[in-house]
């Protein structure tokens, strides 16, 4: 685990303690967690190109770190949150892997291990997630059931009365609360996500096998490459345009997302 290389990868804005690979802080704090979480989301894209490239994604922490840090790539939830958990642990944070089920437009939920999220325990527990695409930019308080505003958007963690110990993450959009995913606080191991990781990269029912996606948060919105369409949101406005061809597509991927794929 090369902490300094990881921090350079996410352009971590704070200096390191001289002679060490640790940020200038005495201990893990919510301030440090917030700045790492934000830096990660602004630099490492959510993307699924390995699936179309025919490269198998395996639930292995070392592979995640090599891909994100050394190959300067992104990934989907298992890779992004798996690698981020390794970074946090190396910096002294207590991290627990959580299984989440993604909510569909029709109100149904995906299966167990559909999504990987993180619990980080400090003076109070926090929900961290750098692998969900358009989601909260900074961690959410796990124990709070009040609204949690972030960057002009509102989020909340709600209890699920019909499910013992069940919780949900919701975002306020166009005046309505929309559920993003549900989860429990039962600790999980990375190997438990292997089955769904395989499903998402092989099943014709998985949206990851039907669409190429690359998405990155920006300070005021998000940029997304969905197949040949470039989508940009900024301060509530949205622009879309089709890219001219493979040359422009690769140039956009390189210049806007920092990703270079093999020919």
Image (cartoon, helix red, strand yellow):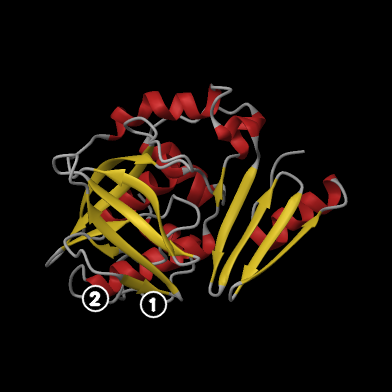
Screen quadrant of the C terminus:
top right
| Neighbourhood count class around disc 2 (C-alpha, 10 Å): few under 14, some 14–19, many 20 upward | few
**Residue shown at 59% from the left, 54% from the top:** 215
Please, is residue 236 above or below residue 199 in the view? Answer: below
Identify the mark at residue 180; answer none if there is no mark: none
Please, is residue 217 above or below residue 179 in the view? Answer: below
**The image quarter in which residue 112 lies:** top left
Q: Nearer the viewer, residue 129 or 71?
A: 129
Q: Is residue 154 visible?
A: yes
> Residue at label 1?
14
Q: Nearer the viewer, residue 17 or 49?
A: 49
Q: Secondary structure at mark 2?
A: loop
Of labels 2 and 1, earlier in sequence is: 1
- 123 relative to 189 in the view: left or right: left
How many callouts does the rendering have?
2
- 44 relative to 29 in the view: left or right: right
**The image quarter in which residue 193 lies:** top left
**Residue shown at 23% from the left, 69% from the top:** 146
Please, is residue 94 above or below residue 42 in the view? Answer: above
Residue 72 at x, y = what percent? 56, 52
Q: Is residue 20 visible?
A: no
| Marks 2 and 1 close (CB-CB < 8 Å) | yes
Residue 84 at x, y = what percent? 36, 52
Residue 2 at x, y = what percent? 38, 53
**Residue shown at 46% from the left, 40% from the top:** 104
Identify the mark at residue 25; answer none if there is no mark: 2
Residue 184 at x, y = what percent? 21, 43
Please, is residue 202 above or below residue 139 in the view? Answer: above
């Amino acid at each position: 685990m090369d902490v300094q290389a990881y921090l350079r990868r996410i352009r971590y804005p704070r200096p390191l303690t001289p002679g060490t690979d640790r940020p200038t802080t005495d201990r893990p704090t919510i301030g440090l967690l917030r700045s790492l979480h934000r830096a990660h989301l602004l630099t490492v894209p959510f993307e699924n190109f390995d699936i179309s490239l025919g490269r198998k994604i395996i639930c292995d922490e070392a592979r995640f770190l090599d891909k994100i840090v050394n190959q300067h790539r992104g990934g989907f939830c298992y890779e992004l949150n798996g690698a981020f958990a390794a970074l946090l642990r190396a910096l002294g944070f207590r991290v627990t892997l959580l299984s989440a089920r993604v909510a569909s437009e029709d109100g149904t939920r995906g299966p167990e291990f559909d999504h990987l999220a993180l619990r980080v325990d400090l003076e109070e527990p926090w929900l961290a997630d750098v692998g969900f695409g358009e989601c909260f930019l900074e961690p959410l308080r796990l124990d709070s059931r009040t609204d949690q505003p972030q960057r002009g958007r509102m989020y909340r963690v709600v209890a699920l009365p019909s499910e013992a110990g069940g919780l949900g993450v919701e975002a306020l959009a166009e005046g309505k609360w929309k559920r993003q995913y549900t989860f429990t606080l039962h600790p999980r191991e990375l190997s438990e996500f292997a089955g769904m990781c395989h499903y998402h990269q092989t099943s014709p029912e998985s949206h990851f096998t039907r669409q190429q996606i690359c998405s990155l948060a920006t300070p005021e919105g998000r940029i997304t490459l969905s197949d040949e369409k470039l989508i940009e949101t900024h301060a509530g406005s949205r622009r879309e345009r089709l890219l001219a061809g493979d040359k422009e597509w690769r140039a956009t991927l390189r210049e806007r997302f920092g990703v270079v794929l093999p020919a």
